[in-house]
Image: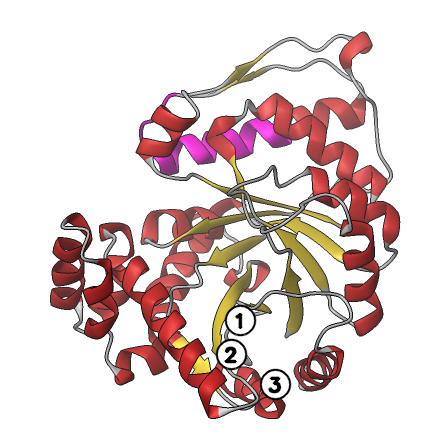
Amino acid sequence: MKLDVGLAVEGKHLPGIDETGRAAESLGFAGLWTSETKHDSFLPLAVAANATERLSLGTSIAIAFSRSPMVTAQVASDLQDLSGGRFILGLGTQVKAHVTRRFGMPWGRPAARLKDYILALRAIWESFQTESGLDYEGEFYRHTLMSPFFNPGPIEHPEIPIYIAGVNTRLATLAGELCDGFHVHPFHTTDYVRQVVEPAIEEGAQKENRSSKDVELATSVFIITGESEEQIAEQRQKMRAQAAFYASTPTYRTVLDVHGWGEVGERLGKLARAKKWDEMPELITDEMLHAFAIEATPDEVGPALVKRYEGLIDRVALYLPFVPGERDEFWRATIETVHGAT
């Protein structure tokens, strides 16, 4: 199991990323992931690639349907070349409202569209690598023009890993069919991973005569920790509110249904629609919170991660901000424990 770190999205985004990358690499993190909420997910990795030598660099996630496959193929190829083969392309579908109303792009049959998108990417990369023509005609995407003037040519590490993110079974099945990895949403439980994610990936892998072991699982983990009971109580309430927010969304109801908590999700959805945000965390019981999050003292976070995820998840990151020079002893001890268990 590898311990990764997620890049914080608050404050200045690009300035200081070189320092963050160097600090993460120095401490021993295995990888650095960027998200795409308030900022672009690719730009920070270009900065980090120049500042590091070993760290894996990935998007968790870049929104696929806001970009043409050609645009994504170009930037992914450049980042793979710049990083010397350390780039991981993590893709997500987002939801209809954001794709159509925020990005102004088409939506429909997201799992089928993402499959076509991935196949288009690989056809484009093949065209780059072989410096040949391009003839891809899929259900949603058509790429049939590539002249030498626009072809960037081959790179030293042409095999770019593709991870996709999802909650329900269709995307997990697609990961089993085509992908190198699957991003399990931070709002998860181990029972959900075992009962929903793993069987879906296995189903997809069998369709294409692949092994499900070829698909790495990566996730971020809700953590409740602190140096005092006051800090822990504050963090516990934050995680309770975060869990309530996700549980109120129908997309994530699958996680609740595994435990028989679907009715709680319906009640949370009604409260969210009524904008009764303060009442929502009260519906997350201690049993639910402990299923969604790890609660441990700082020196026990590493052992708790190993106990919960060893043999189940290949790459974990903590749902905590990483600031260079802060809590270095905590991070170093956690990294050593997680990496030492493998």
Mark 3 and mark 1: span between their CA atoms?
14 Å
Q: Is residue 144 above or below residue 26?
A: above
Q: Amino acid at mark 3?
A: Gly
Q: Amino acid at mark 1?
A: Ile
Residue 85 in sight in this render: no
Crowd rating for badge 3 (residues with CA inside 10 Å; few <14, some 14–19, many 20+): many
Secondary structure of the magenta portion, mostly? Answer: helix
Residue 317 found in image quarter: bottom right
Q: Which range is magenta?
A: 106-122
Disc 2: which residue: 309
Q: Quadrant of the N terminus?
A: bottom right
Crowd rating for badge 2 (residues with CA inside 10 Å; few <14, some 14–19, many 20+): some
Q: Position of residue 208 (x, y in %)?
A: 48, 47
Give residue 61's mark: none
Residue at left 57%, top 25%? Answer: 69
Disc 3: which residue: 302
Disc 1: which residue: 313
**Label 3 SS:** helix
Q: Nearer the viewer, residue 330 or 204?
A: 330
Mark 2 and mark 1: span between their CA atoms?
5 Å
Q: Which one is closest to the eye, mark 2 or mark 3?
A: 3
Of labels 2 and 3, earlier in sequence is: 3
Q: Position of residue 110 (x, y in %)?
A: 36, 35
